[in-house]
Amino acid sequence: ECYVKPDGLDYRGTVDTTVGGILCQKWSEQTPHTHEFSQVNYPNGGLGRHNYCRNPDYDGAPWCFTTNPDIRWQHCDVGRP
Ligand SMILES: O=S(=O)(Nc1cnn(C2CCNCC2)c1)c1cc(Cl)ccc1F
C-alpha cells in the first residue's frame, strides 16, 4: 500500500500491525490505552471503528496505539513509494 503525501498523512490502507509486529488497538476503543485520537478530535484523520495504521497528527509515518499494554504506540511499515 503506497501513499504520496509526506509522512503518510493520507494513508488509508489496511495495515493493522506495527513495525514490532504488534496488533493495533482500534481507534474507537480506549483499552488497553486511553487516548485523545477520536474521530471527533481528528475528523480528517481516517480514524474509525478499525485498527488500521494512520497518521492523524503529522507524525513521521503512520502509526497506531498497540494492543500491548506496555507499548503505548508504535509506527507501522505501510510501504513507501
Ligand atoms: O492520548 S495521546 O494521544 N497519546 C499519545 C502519546 N504520544 N502519542 C504520539 C502518537 C504518535 N505521534 C506522536 C505522539 C500519542 C496524548 C496526546 C497528547 Cl497531546 C497528550 C497526552 C496524550 F496522552
Image: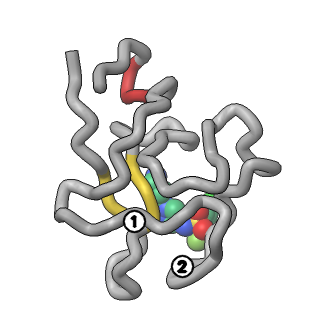
The disc label shown at residue 1, or none: none
Q: Is mark 2 within 8 Å of ligand 1?
A: yes
Ligand 1 within 8 A of label 1's CB? Answer: yes
Quarter, ligand 1 = bottom right
Residue 59: % across, % down: 43, 41
* Residue for point 70% across, 32% down: 44
Judged left or right of residue 23, residue 13 is right
Q: Residue at x 40, y 76 (%)?
A: 67
The image quarter containing residue 57 is: top right
N-terminal of the two: label 2 or label 1? 2
Label 1 amino acid?
Trp
Disc 1 crowd rating (10 Å Cα; few below 14, some 14-19, many 20+) is some
Callout 2 secondary element: loop
Residue at the spot of label 1: 73
Q: Which residue is disc 2 drawn over?
A: 33
Question: Can you give x and y, in whole percent of width and height, for residue 29 in the image?
Answer: 64, 71
Q: Are discs 2 and 1 less than 8 Å apart at CB?
A: yes
